[in-house]
Image (cartoon, rainbow, N blue to C red):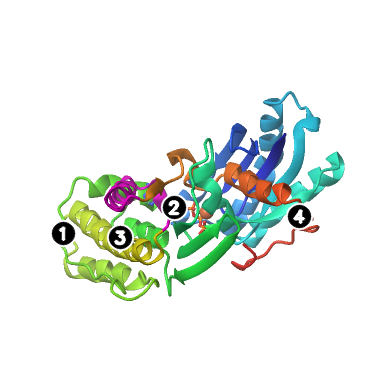
Amino acid sequence: DLILGIETSCDDTSVALVAQDGTIAACETFNQFEIHAGYGGVFPELASRAHVQAILPAVDKVMAAVDHDRSRIKAIGVTRGPGLIGSLLVGVNAGQALGFAWDKPVYGINHLRGHLRSPDLEEKRIEYPAVMLLVSGGHTLLAYLANQSDVTLLGTTRDDSAGESYDKVARMIGLGMPGGPAIDKLAKTGKSVFDFPRPMMHQGYEFSFSGLKSSVARLLEKEPDCAKEDIATSFVDACLDVLEKKLRRAVDEYQPKSLVVVGGVSASPQLRAQVDAICTETGVKSCLPPLKWATDNAAMIALAAWDYVAKDLEPDTVPTPSLAVSAW
Ligand code: ATP
Ligand code: FE
């Protein structure tokens, strides 16, 4: 049995077929980097239009991988939020229409729940209880997971997310979108010479990244010719120092079996190395999504939908798009 997952919350149109054990039968993702390249960020209306064009070809492609045999599809899971409303509507409408036409239940899935299940793709990795850090384009949050459906929020960001600060700093120093990978690459070549602030590092589990971003901007105003690679290195250092401190604090306080780090920024090699180091030192299991599944994809949405099917819950009958981070 497979679940058909659909993800269209931002600028990736992704459709996947995933088995309950996390095996991926097929996944097709169309990104929109070229469409948004000239705007310095995702242009919502253009994103929705691109989803409309890509969604059915993507469904067709993954279904070809199972010879269009619908009897193998147990249910459909579609991202219902948080995300861009126009983009979400394309996925939700496609999911509803397919569910109606194929007579399959449709589950509305919280995008963040998809990210938090991503380390169990391909093989099961997470052991509970776990401490989770979600670092993505729109969110930065720490949570305690007693099991896969019991999520206690420990802290979130008061302003920007970690991924957003990567993207904005990348833009300031003239790197393209997406900013994260570009910053990582440049950071490997520079020196950590600028002492950027580490906001809220010594306080609890909340985050704040806007001050870090502004201090990069102020430095560039004062010294427009300073070495960009040194800015990248110093910025990554400051960002990771904060994340590391909070992760260690949470591991110390909650004594989890695993440390789960997910979301787009978990693709950062610097962050991955840091998480592995913390885990080796503390004897906690390191649970990162395979690199390919760190950024947005439909496979994680399908896997999250399995949690509902396995529990035999009633489908969220009408998966209304939701903009809130509610209902894990
Ligand atoms: P959310 O999941 O919060 O709704 P999103 O879906 O837009 O937001 P993701 O796709 O999970 O975000 O992550 C995208 C973010 O990850 C971007 O900010 C991007 O810069 C960052 N990112 C991607 N790859 C890397 C990398 N290698 N290093 C650092 N950051 C990265
Ligand atoms: Fe995401």
First-in-chain label (1 vs 3): 1
Front-lying residue, 312 or 301: 312
Front-lying residue, 55 or 47: 55
Disc 4 to disc 2, C-alpha distance: 25 Å
Give the residue at mark 4: 313
Q: Quadrant of residue 251?
A: bottom left
Give the residue at mark 3: 244
Name the amino acid type tagged 3: Glu
Disc 2 to disc 1, C-alpha distance: 36 Å
Disc 1 to disc 4, C-alpha distance: 57 Å
Name the amino acid type tagged 1: Cys
Residue 131: x percent and y percent? 44, 59
Give the residue at mark 2: 260
Front-lying residue, 41 or 280: 280
First-in-chain label (3 vs 2): 3
Name the amino acid type tagged 2: Val
Give the structural element (helix, strand or loop) at label 1: loop
